[in-house]
C-alpha cells in the first residue's frame, strides 16, 4: 500500500514538473528569466541537485547572451535550462 502511494506521488510530481516546465516561456526577457530563476531556486530537494546545477549553468549563459544582445543564444540556453529542470 505504501509502495503504491509513493508510486502515485512520484508520477504526480513528474507530470506536474513537466507541465510546469512546458508552461514556461523560453523567450529571452527579463520577466521570463526572473520567473525561471525563481523556479530553479525553488528546487531544494537533494535529488534535484544535479538538475539544478545544470539549469543554473544554462541560466548564467542565457544572462550573458542577453547582455550581449544575442537573443538566439539566450533563448537556446533558456530552453536547455527548462529541459534540465524536468524530472527524469
Image: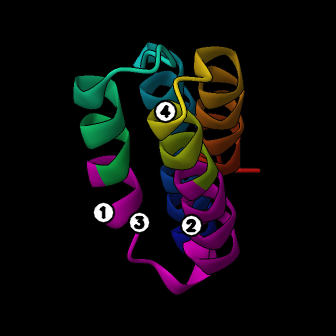
Which residue shows up at 47% across the image and 13% down it? 27
Residue position for label 1: 42
Residue numbers of the magenta segment: 38-60
Q: For this view, does 36 lie left or right of residue 50?
A: left
Residue position for label 3: 43
Q: CA distance from mark 1 to mark 3?
A: 4 Å
Proximity of marks 1 and 2: CB atoms separated by less than 8 Å? no
Residue position for label 2: 52
Which quadrant of the figure contains the N terminus?
bottom right
Label 1 SS? loop
Q: Earlier in the sequence, mark 2 or mark 4?
A: 2
Q: Earlier in the sequence, mark 2 or mark 3?
A: 3
Residue position for label 4: 66
Proximity of marks 2 and 3: CB atoms separated by less than 8 Å? yes
Label 2 crowding class (10 Å Cα cut-off): few <14, some 14-19, many 20+? many
Label 4 crowding class (10 Å Cα cut-off): few <14, some 14-19, many 20+? some
Position of residue 11 measured from the top left corner of the image (x, y, whole percent): 60, 43
Q: Quadrant of residue 49?
A: bottom right
The answer to if 77 sits in the magenta stretch is: no
Label 2 SS? helix
Q: CA distance from mark 2 to mark 3?
A: 7 Å
Residue sitting at the far bottom: 46
Location of residue 11 with respect to 38 vertically, above or below: above
Q: Quadrant of residue 79?
A: top right
Location of residue 3 with respect to 83 vertically, above or below: below
Label 3 SS? loop
Position of residue 31 measured from the top left corner of the image (x, y, whole percent): 22, 26
Q: Earlier in the sequence, mark 1 or mark 4?
A: 1
Amino acid at each position: 500500500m505504501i509502495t503504491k502511494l509513493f508510486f502515485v506521488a512520484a508520477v504526480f510530481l513528474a507530470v506536474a514538473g513537466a507541465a510546469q516546465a512546458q508552461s514556461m516561456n523560453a523567450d529571452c526577457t527579463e520577466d521570463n528569466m526572473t520567473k525561471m530563476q525563481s523556479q530553479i531556486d525553488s528546487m531544494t530537494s537533494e535529488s534535484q541537485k544535479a538538475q539544478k546545477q545544470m539549469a543554473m549553468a544554462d541560466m548564467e549563459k542565457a544572462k550573458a547572451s542577453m547582455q550581449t544582445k544575442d537573443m538566439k543564444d539566450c533563448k537556446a540556453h533558456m530552453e536547455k535550462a527548462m529541459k534540465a529542470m524536468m524530472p527524469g
